[in-house]
Structure formats: C-alpha cells, structure tokens
Image (cartoon, grey):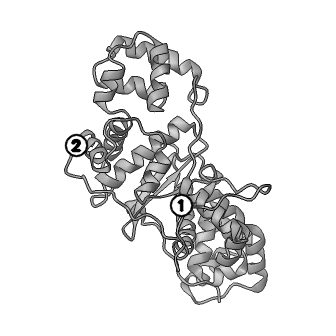
Amino acid sequence: MQNPERVELVRLRLGLTKIGFAKALGVDRKTIQRFESGTHELSSKCIQTLVELSCFPKEFFEKNKFDYPDPGAVSFRSLRSLTATLRNAALAAGALAFELDDWVEARFELPEHSLPQLNNSTPADAALALRAYWGIGERPIGNMINMLESHGTRIFSLSEETRHLDAYSFWRNDRPYVFLNTMKTPEHSRFDAAHELGHLVLHRHGGPSHRSAEDEANAFASTFLMPPADLRARLPVVRGLRDLFEGKKRWRVSAAALAYTLHKQGVISDWHYRGYCIELNKYGRASEPFGIEPENSQVWQKILTDLWRQGITIFHVAQELKIPERELWNLLFGIAAAPGMGERPQPATLRMVK
C-alpha cells in the first residue's frame, strides 16, 4: 500500500503543484485528492508512471512515516528569489537527509553538539562568547564546515533543484542541521555557514521568523569570522583594494564582506566604502581576485571512505534506503568527494557503533 505522505514528499521534490502532479501522472486532480484522504489507491499504471517520473523505486512509497522539517523553525539564508516551490523542494531534501543521517548514525558514532544557546546576547557578543566557549580565541577559522562538524552540526548540501537558495538551518531532536549551497563561491559559502550558526545559537527557541533575525545572523557571522580585535590589529588602516584583497586571505571572506565589516567598525569612511563597493562590483560576486579553495567535510569523507573499505558504496546505501542515488549525492555535492577508485583509501579514524 502506498503511503500518501511519501508520494507528497516526492511531489515536492519534483517541484510540481498538485494539478501539475496529477497531469504528469495522467490522472485528474480528484484522483489525487481521494488518494491523499486515504479513500482511494493509485493504480499500478499510475505508480509505474510515478516511478519513471521521479526515479524513486516503488518500495519508497510503501515505507512508513518519516520526519519532515518544521517550516516554522527553518531559517532560509536567502529570501529574495525564494518561491514556495523552491522552499518546499528544499524542505523535502531535508526529509531525505534525515533518512540518510539516521542510517549513518546507526552505524557510526558522530560528535554530539556543543552549541550553547545565546539568545540573550547581542549578535556580536554571542559570536565572541561562542569563540571563547569553543576555545578558538581571536584566530581566523580555517574551515567552517570542519568547525561546525567538530561541534556536532550535521552538514548537507543543497541540490541543483534549490540552487537559488544560499543556505538554511534548523534543529531536529536536539541536533543542529545546516544545508549549504556549495555552488556559490567558497567565501560566500563560508559566510553562509557562519550565518546559519548564528541562527542556531541565537534563534533556536524563538525561531528565525522575526524581521531582525537575518540582520542578527549577519552581524553574528561578521564578528565570528572577523573578530574586531584581530581585525583592527592586522588591518588598522585600509589604503586601497590591495589591502582588502590581502586581508581576505587571512579571514577567508570576500573582499566585499571585509569592506562592509571594516566600514561598520569605523576603519573605512563612508566615502571610501562607497568607492570600494563600486570597484568590487566590477569584478562580480563570482570572479573576485584571490579566491580561496572550497571547503570539504572531513566527517563525510571519513564515513564514505570507511563504507567503501567495507564494500559499501552510495549505490548500496541508496538501495537500502529506497532513495535514488542521485538524491543522496545531491545532499553531499561539494562537501564530500567519493573515494578514489584507484589506490585503496587509508583507514578512516571514525569509530563504528557495535
């Protein structure tokens, strides 16, 4: 028997309205409505069409209920071009990530989270407090993905169907989750990761829905990536774009983000800041000089390598979960690479659950 909720999940992943979904399956809207209410079963022909349309095996639609991200508790990094279709597709990807994450957690011992709740602090104070809590002082952060993972945050990537989104985050069963669009520049993605970290520690209980939440997360990210004391000590004066380009190498942020933060701290005047913005806009967001290397996930790399050593590939995981392999790779795209098929990978230092 098909589970209507799983059929609905796949509809959302496909980005189809209910009317468009019914048309794609070759049935009328009332047939879908009766199926969703539990008074009607889809025909075998309709199920076969659904399988061919979605690439999800029919067994997926027969599985039990699943967890779905609470839309009211999810923070989306970009809202300008976010349609309901894109939002729903992203949340559906989150539901698939839960199934993969639960499968992995049953086999590996992953880090517990150590994210304190700092909702009573200002964003800047919260960022500095978290740095102190994690014992990283004022030094630059080399890899934001690794930093989040080491403190128990589950990291996944956004797929091509949700490429207009920057990032989103939420809590599930006392576990923090962050989804990143790794098709953005590495500098952009790092800031997104810090932004979502801000949501996780500032807005867990109140939710990210109030108007100032995005501004607060941005302020948190700026301070977390570019601590004021280190910034002023290393870059007390900006004489031109060259100083910004040199500075971005240290803090691994975009020159635009660095200029904005320095302007906020009074290091750059209004007049000079406007001039830098004009010059930086000529480069475009995707072609800024002195770009940094993309960040990767150590946790996912270790998991995939360890599984590969056991003869278990993503294909095998997909078969067990009854989820298309491409959907699983979409969740790992840009943050984890498949182990090489030439030389055998070195053993991973990740403890298996007995």
What element does badge 1 sit on?
A: helix
Q: In which quarter of the image is residue 90?
A: bottom right
Q: Residue at x 77, y 55 (%)?
A: 343
Identify residue for label 1. Answer: 88
Q: In which quarter of the image is the N terminus?
A: bottom right
Residue 324 showing in the rendered view: no
User: Which is nearer the eye, 307 or 194?
Assistant: 307
Callout 1, which amino acid? Asn
Where is residue 211 shown, x and y percent of the image?
31, 46
In the picture provided, is 147 more to the left or to the right than 94?
Answer: left
In this view, which residue lies farthest toward the left?
120
Q: Residue 122 carries which label?
A: 2
**In this rendering, is residue 154 above or below 216?**
below
Q: Nearer the viewer, mark 1 or mark 2?
A: 2
Where is residue 268 shown, x and y percent of the image?
34, 16
Counting labels gives 2
Q: How crowded is mark 2: few (under 14 residues within 10 Å), some or many (20 or more)?
A: few
Q: Quadrant of residue 127?
A: top left
Q: Which mark is residue 182?
A: none
Q: Which residue is drawn at 40% across and 44% down?
A: 195
**In this rendering, is residue 51 above or below 43?**
above
Residue 129 showing in the rendered view: yes
Between the C-alphas of marks 1 and 2, the distance is 31 Å
**In this rendering, is residue 292 above or below 311?**
above
Callout 2, which amino acid? Thr
Q: Residue at x 64, y 53 (%)?
A: 333
In the picture provided, is 15 more to the left or to the right than 174?
Answer: right
Return the disc, 1 or 2, that comes first in the chain's sequence. Answer: 1
Where is residue 311 shown, x and y percent of the image?
73, 71
What element does badge 2 sit on?
A: loop
User: Which is nearer the eye, 307 or 285?
Assistant: 307
**In this rendering, is residue 206 above or below 137?**
below
